[in-house]
Amino acid sequence: MKAKYGILEYVHPVSNRTSYKSVKLEDVGSDWFDCLTDDEQSWVQQRKKYSHLNYDEVIEQYDKDILPAKIEREKKLGWKCDEQGNIIGIIK
């Protein structure tokens, strides 16, 4: 599988200089926000969909957006999940 990359924009708070960093996006879109690396979290927060939200709102919205795909992925692996994405048993 081909690796996904994103560009992380950083503005230094004192000098106001902007720098850019390439971020490998291994888990973005497939894991809960808290499980993402710091770089991946920063990248998600810069996306248009999340940039206007505060940190707590980003976590809530990202997890809400990811939940259906997470549950579907777990079902394909044979796990039964509750509505929060927690594994509660094996699909028989």
Image (spheres, rainbow, N blue to C red):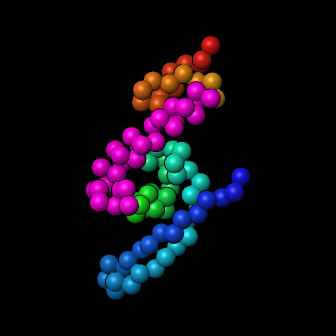
Residue projecting furthest to the right: 1
Q: Is residue 70 magenta?
A: yes
At 42% from the left and 43% from the top, the residue drawn is 65
Question: Relative to 33, does residue 5 appear above or below in the rendering?
Answer: below
Q: Is residue 41 magenta?
A: no
User: Is residue 41 shown left or right of residue 30?
Assistant: left
Residue projecting furthest to the front: 48
Question: Relative to 43, does residue 70 appear above or below in the rendering?
Answer: above
Image x and y of residue 92, in percent:
62, 13
Image x and y of residue 79, in percent:
58, 24
User: Is residue 48 shown left or right of residue 92?
Assistant: left
Q: Nearer the viewer, residue 45 or 12?
A: 45
Magenta-highlighted residues = 48-76
Question: Relative to 65, does residue 73 appear above or below in the rendering?
Answer: above
Question: Relative to 6, does residue 21 appear above or below in the rendering?
Answer: below
Q: Is residue 34 visible?
A: no
